[in-house]
Image (spheres, rainbow, N blue to C red):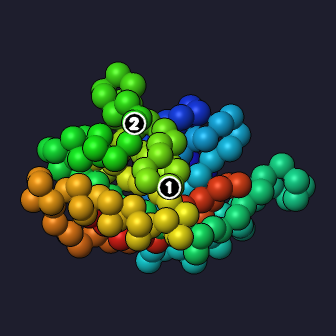
Amino acid sequence: MVTGVVPKPGRTALNYFCNASGGIVTEMTVTSFAAERYWLISAAAGERHDEHWLREHLPTDGRSVHLENVSARYGTLIVVGPRSRELLSLLTSADLGNEAFPWLALRTIEIGYAKAFALRVNYVGELGWELHLPVEHVLSVYDLLWEAGERFGISDYVCMQWTACGLRNAIGPGRAI
């Protein structure tokens, strides 16, 4: 079903999902919150397809895997660029250094009144983080990032929005900065 390495707890990886003959069906970011607790992030355009495909391939015992789409409950902000660590450091006490927060790692960090699932990953070739937040906190965190980022010349960029289909937990569409 998955062609890549399934990440260990606290880690994330891009994986391809295949059909029985080995053809690629889709790709998703797979993040492990704990042993046997995963979060899958899919492209918005493929959300319904990917959720349907996952449901069609669940074990038939009905108990060993729980799949829940929580796309409507979470949003994503992307903080990317050569000074993204400096910017985030103004808003969180979390250690964002390479040793404490390496590439492809997951950490829970606090920003303002919100707790974010932060992934040290992005797909634009720069230093960056994906911040996955309950939707009720997305705008306030965006405002904090914007205000703190003005000194760095922050700007919005257009990015494909993500939705998620997750095993026990998932994250969905959001704004990118």
Residue on which disc 1 sits: 113
Residue 152 against residue 173 in the figure, above or below: above
Q: Are marks 1 and 2 in contact (CB under 8 Å)?
A: no
Residue visible at 50% across and 55% down in the picture: 113
Q: Residue at x 19, y 56 (%)?
A: 149
- Disc 1 is placed on an element classified as loop
* Relative side of 160 to 59, left or right: left
User: Who's the residue at 28% across and 69% down the image?
Assistant: 159
Residue 159 in the figure: left or right of residue 173: left
Q: Please tell me which residue is depicted at 63% across the width and 68% down the height of the picture.
A: 70
Residue 32, image quadrant: top right
Q: Nearer the viewer, residue 130 or 155?
A: 155
- How far apart marks 1 and 2 lie (CA) works out to 13 Å
Rendered location of residue 124, percent (x, y): 22, 54
Residue nearer the viewer, 150 or 176: 150
Looking at the rendering, in which quadrant would you find the C terminus? bottom left
Is 107 left, or right, of 156 in this rendering? right
What amino acid does circle 1 point to?
A: Tyr
- For this rendering, which residue is in front, 12 or 176? 176
Image spot of residue 8 (x, y percent)? 56, 32
Sequence-wise, the earlier of marks 1 and 2 is: 2
Which label was assigned to residue 93? 2
Task: Label 2: state its secondary structure.
Answer: loop
Classed neighbour count for the residue bearing mark 1: other residues with Cα under 10 Å, few (<14), some (14–19), many (≥20): few
Q: Position of residue 151 (x, y in %)?
A: 12, 54
- Residue 98 rendering spot, x and y as whole percentages: 30, 27
Q: Is residue 124 visible?
A: no
Can residue 97 be seen? yes
Q: Amino acid at mark 2?
A: Ser
